[in-house]
Amino acid sequence: MMRSFGGSMAAAVLVMPAAAHAADPTPSIRPAPAWVVPVKVPTPNPKLLALPAQVLVLNVQERLAREATTTYLEYVAQPQTVTGLQGIGTVAMPWNVERSDFAIHKIEINRAGKVINALDPAAMMVLRQETNLDKAMLDGGRTVVLPVKGLQLGDRLTVAVSYTTKAPVIAVRPEEVWMVNADETINRTERRLIVPDDLAVKWYRAPATAEPTVTKAGGYTDYFFVGSGAKAREWPTGTPSRFTAPLVQVTAWSNWNEVATAVIPLFAKARTIKDGSPLAAEADRIAAASKDPEQRLLAALRLAQEKVRYVALLLGQGAYVPVGAEETWEQKFGDCKGKTALLLGLLDRLGIEAEPMLVSSSLNSYMPELHPSLAVFDHVMVRARVNGRTLYLDPTSYGQRTVSELSRSAFVRGLPLVPGTDLISIARTIPAQALSQADVVWDGRQGFERRVPFTATLVLRDETASQMRAAKAASEDADKHLENLQNFVPGVANKDLALKSEEPEQPDGSYKVTFAGTATMDWSPIKGLKGYRYELSQNTVKWEFEDGRSGDKDRDLPLVMNWPYYIASSETILLPNGGKGFKAEGEQIDRRFGAVRITRSIGIEGDKAVTRAVFVHEKPEASAEETRSMKKVADELNDKFAYVVAPGKIRPVKDEEGKKD
């Protein structure tokens, strides 16, 4: 639902001609709106002369209105090589015919101060091109193509067009959300927004956005934003996007309930399932299989995720209006709205309380700061309640098998579509169990002066299990999939990990994999330490923490954590001679610092040496102060190795890469 007019038009695109559809509309050709301010063209930027072509200025002007909003776009480009001449010599402008009317105002060549009209209506083509098919999206996209005759090196090409929104199917308010992109290939980017003084609006401007120039005249306030082609500053790794990207929001919505009220009726109708329909039969089948509401919910979610493929339908009313649950089931495909309607309908028949909830994937980091708006949302999912627990169900995901993973969400805010609603914070709880558990057992009872047999068991849970199921379903490379599984196992080189079994669908919802093989164990002496010793795997507790924060300008920046993140591992060595004389050396670790917790235990347990380690991210984002403490402690823990020390000499066995780093 978020709209952007700047990004896809920053440079001309060469498009090969194709037959136009007979029913396609054609652009109008007319003068620019009277409120458009003439664009001032800057001189070429010497730093961009190495490019094939240079966009001297990209100018977007928009006047908010209670009815249709018109957005004017003009760019001036200069070819600098033959390749650049070919690149900009065919004007290609995107046009969503379902959502807007399109007008061309001018296509001109400026040659040594002389203006040449290059707009030839007879040469114009409208190509039916769905540009997002690779994303399983049908949005009614067209491309308006017009070759520019006579363009030469040394010329400047000016293109000016406008888009006027069509009336949507729901009552919306004037609103806009956009990035003030400072593309390094564009000399100057300009965005002008004109707001009627009698229209009450709220503004949000991200920290990375420069202040606009503001003027008032004739009952309107004019906001003028500028971005240059200067290289943006380098941000430290993990800086939240709300700090780094220059976002601007303006909205006339008064509150979040007003936004929800506009959409609620659409899903109320779409979620209806009639008695006796094929989809009703599916709900009855689920109900008959189990009386447990959690199992019913999981079965309904699995049907929506895996029996209906994802295809975004944004044609006509499809940008807002969901396809009905029964139609979605009949055609076996749907977008997030249709799949949500289907899941809601199933849950209704199963007696489970649920409602649709709007979320934003593209603006997730910004959501706590943004004002009420429909334009900020680009996705919808389901919020449900079972046995006193609130769960978040995304029917466009894949492979989810546990209620525990549904108690969390990657989204930080959501708008439940119920009367009297407000924007809510979504719980981001720590998993109760490790999402990845790897256990390696070495059988050294016959000694270590040979290749030692081992077994390795990998158990993936919750989000990690569902992600691996999705990856397996989509994988066309069995070797790559195997490598992905092997990478979870610490302490043994992938080449030694022979797959014995793979069970993606365990009764508890986990994904279990077993490996076996033989490998060398390096018991070589270490300088400065006594005895022949084996270094236990550091993979779980080792954290190469490099965030790039330095100086006052980075001091207050938080850090985005990989979340949820909870890994655990154990390494067990069955020792010869009942373990007699073997010792364990290494610090027992139990440290909670910043936004993480790391634990490690090590000891001799009868005839076994055992180490167990856990690494947990306890929150999705660390404050600047927490980040500084994490860096300090991580560097300290990386040097705390753990060993099993033998009672005597062990002859080394030659082998290549017996362990992972």
Image (tube, rainbow, N blue to C red):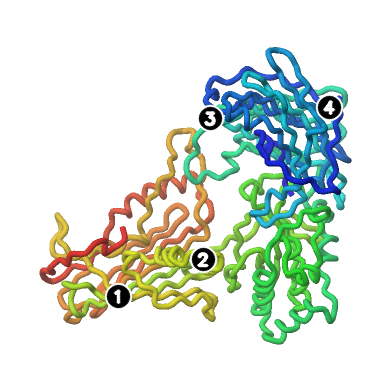
User: Residue flagged by tag 3: what amino acid is it?
Assistant: Lys
Which residue is disc 4 drawn over?
A: 32
User: Residue flagged by tag 2: what amino acid is it?
Assistant: Thr
Residue positioned 79% across, 61% down in the render: 322
Determine the residue located farthest toward the top in the rendered image.
113
Which residue is disc 1 drawn over?
A: 454
Q: What separation in Å lies between label 1 and label 4 (alpha carbons)?
A: 75 Å
Which residue is disc 2 drawn over?
A: 464
User: Above or below — where is 176 with respect to 316?
Assistant: above
Instruction: Tell us which disc is closer to us: 2 or 1.
Output: 1
**In the depicted view, which residue is nearer to us: 145 or 353?**
145
What label does residue 98 carry, if any? none
Which residue is disc 3 drawn over?
A: 231
User: Above or below — where is 320 with respect to 100?
Assistant: below
Q: Are marks 2 and 1 in contact (CB under 8 Å)?
A: no
**Helix, strand or loop at mark 4:** loop
Q: What separation in Å lies between label 4 and label 2 (alpha carbons)?
A: 53 Å
